[in-house]
Amino acid sequence: MSPLDWAFLPLQRYFDFAGRSPRSEYWWFYLLVSILSMACGWIDLAVDPTAVVGVASLLVSLATIIPLLAVSVRRLHDRNRSGWNLLKPPAPGIVMAILAAFGPFGLFVGTIIFVGTCLWLVVLLCLPGTSGPNHYGEHPYGLQYYAT
């Protein structure tokens, strides 16, 4: 498959939270969404420089949030992890807000926890998937891969 095929595949699997997605599908789609978001930001800035959120950016965000969540869940499934792991980075944000009440040290500790969980999630999304079938289905390429 070409990079464009990988980038548009999550749009074809819009509400599909089951199964597995390889790294190429996730990262090419992430790149597509990032480019679309930047382009819409520039368009919104050209149309109305005083707007906080532009119409084009809002429409792209609303159109891509579900497929981005779905491909993220499928990517975690490829690592044999539950999609609920996507909720781990926001949870420390709540802890950070509570710890901020205890002053700057609490805010610092909460920030470290938040950044750590975000990095953990990025590492999970970057690692290769499990070889062969796992709890969430067959290998997305349909082949037996053995990670070295």
Image (tube, rainbow, N blue to C red):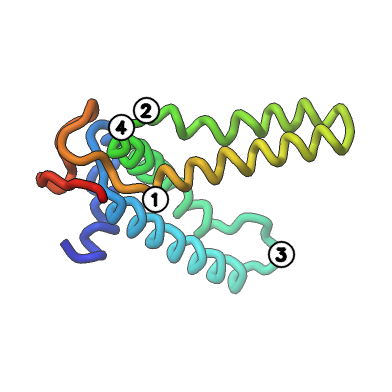
For the N terminus, the image quarter is bottom left
User: Label 2, on which residue?
Assistant: 82
Asked whether residue 11 is in view, the answer is no
Q: Return the residue nearer the eye: 11 or 141.
A: 141
- Disc 1/disc 3 C-alpha distance (Å): 37 Å
User: Label 4, on which residue?
Assistant: 80
Query: Dot 2, crowdedness within 10 Å: few (<14), some or many (≥20)?
Result: some
> In the picture provided, is 78 more to the left or to the right than 139?
right
Image depth: mark 4 or mark 3 in front: 4
> Mark 4 falls on what kind of element?
loop
> In the picture provided, is 45 more to the left or to the right than 1?
right
- Disc 4/disc 2 C-alpha distance (Å): 7 Å
- Disc 4/disc 3 C-alpha distance (Å): 45 Å
> In the picture provided, is 65 more to the left or to the right than 94?
left
User: Label 1, on which residue?
Assistant: 126
Report the residue at 25% width, 31% height from top: 18
- Disc 2/disc 1 C-alpha distance (Å): 16 Å
Q: Earlier in the sequence, mark 4 or mark 3?
A: 3
